[in-house]
Image (cartoon, helix red, strand yellow):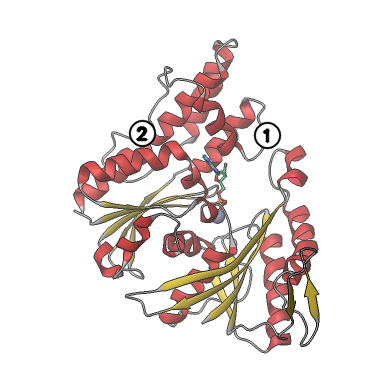
Amino acid sequence: MRILAIETSCDDTSLALVIGQGGLKTPRFSVLKNITSSQIKIHRPFGGVVPTLAKREHQKNLPKILQKFLPLPVGRQACLPAGRCRVGMGKLKIDAIAVTVGPGLEPALWAGIEFAKELSEKLKKPLIGVNHMEGHLYSFLLPQKTAISKAKFPISKLFPAIALVVSGGHTILLKMDSLTKWKKLGETRDDAAGEAFDKVARLRGLPYPGGPEIQKLAVKGKPVINFPRPMLKEKNYEFSFSGLKTAVLYYLRDNPAASKANVAASFQQAVIDVLVGKTVRAAKEFNVKSILLCGGVSANKALRSALRVAAKKLGTEFFVPDFEYNTDNAAMIAAAAYVQKLRNKKLRLIAQSNLTL
Ligand code: KG4
Ligand code: ZN
């Protein structure tokens, strides 16, 4: 099944053309194209994403990116300067269109949904509404450049699994019994992990989004400051990161000359200790076969490596999507749409900003 997917839940406008094959036990994907246009530069002066600006930019970007997916009209020739030419075959060959319907910023979501509806009518192809968080959850199914992906099939080998979903808006720990059956063990009571990275970066005058900036700084420092590990010792699977952000704020107030790199490294280590600590405890309690890490914060190299080491110690498999599929992208929306189609699940085609897993 060839799926053209559209993602506009926040500040990335992304389109992807993905082929999904196989059933729920062996779903396989080929990503033919995955193009993302970031709006970071536009939102940066405001220190975060401005929903109405995001909508306007999505509306501008969507038709431009779509152009890159359209084949040449029949018979038309296009030649590269080097001399290689190709002849157009005509229509865009797809079986369905997928679009994120939530969670996300409502105006931004509507930009994608309205565009997808128009396209679906024009091309006379069915439209599949997708939960953005399911996109993150299934992103590990997308083709990986590392050999580890071979260990994924049959998919039943992975379950039960613990999935740690960490993004700018969510921090969720799931116990998955199959690809489509899961139970939420816990989530954040206040800030999400990515949000904590963004807020601490802002305290340090670093640009949005803060996660990659903190990571860059942390590499140059040492985790010598003992920031709190919120809720790590509590026997539940809930998280809380707003107290940690406040601890960094007070530390900076009392130690204005503190090394930026050491503060970044210490904050990052505190977040990682909590995320890894709770995930490992869940993996032990439920005796799982694998640990999955996904969402924008899974791009953090120190977190990936800490969880990989912890999983190895436990003797469980560890899966994390390639870097291309950590932060928001449309390829993951296509993967979720394909799984959704296989299980015959339908979501309403309206913006649902509070949708969850
Ligand atoms: O999944 P995502 O692209 O968007 C949401 O669905 O929220 O996640 C974005 C979040 C931001 O908070 C960003 O700071 C964080 O992911 N992030 C990182 C890194 N790259 C992105 N956090 C820590 N380290 C990174 N390398
Ligand atoms: Zn996301």
Residue drawn at x 55%, y 60% is: 354
Up the image or down, 125 lies above or below 352; here it is below
Up the image or down, 280 lies above or below 263; here it is below
Quarter occupied by residue 46: top right
Residue 353 in picture, x, y percent from top left: 60, 61
Circle 1 — which element?
loop
Up the image or down, 19 lies above or below 247; here it is below
Q: Amino acid at mark 2?
A: Asp
Residue 305 seen anywhere in this rendered image of the structure: yes
Residue 121 in picture, x, y percent from top left: 71, 86
Q: Is residue 252 left or right of residue 207?
A: left
Residue 222 in picture, x, y percent from top left: 45, 20
Q: Is residue 340 left or right of residue 199?
A: left
Q: Is residue 24 left or right of residue 72?
A: left
Q: Amino acid at mark 1?
A: Pro
| Residue that mark 2 sits on | 273
Most extreme residue toward the bottom is: 124
Q: Badge 1 local density, few (<14 within 10 Å), some, or many (20+)?
A: many
Rendered-image quadrant of the C terminus = bottom left
Residue drawn at x 41%, y 39% is: 303
Instruction: Judge by depth and name the residue closer to the eye, 113 or 119.
Output: 119
Count of numbered marks: 2
The label shown at residue 207 is 1
Quarter occupied by residue 21: bottom left
Residue drawn at x 26%, y 41% is: 235
Q: CA distance from mark 2 to mark 1?
A: 25 Å
Q: Badge 2 local density, few (<14 within 10 Å), some, or many (20+)?
A: some
Quadrant where ligand 1 appears? top right
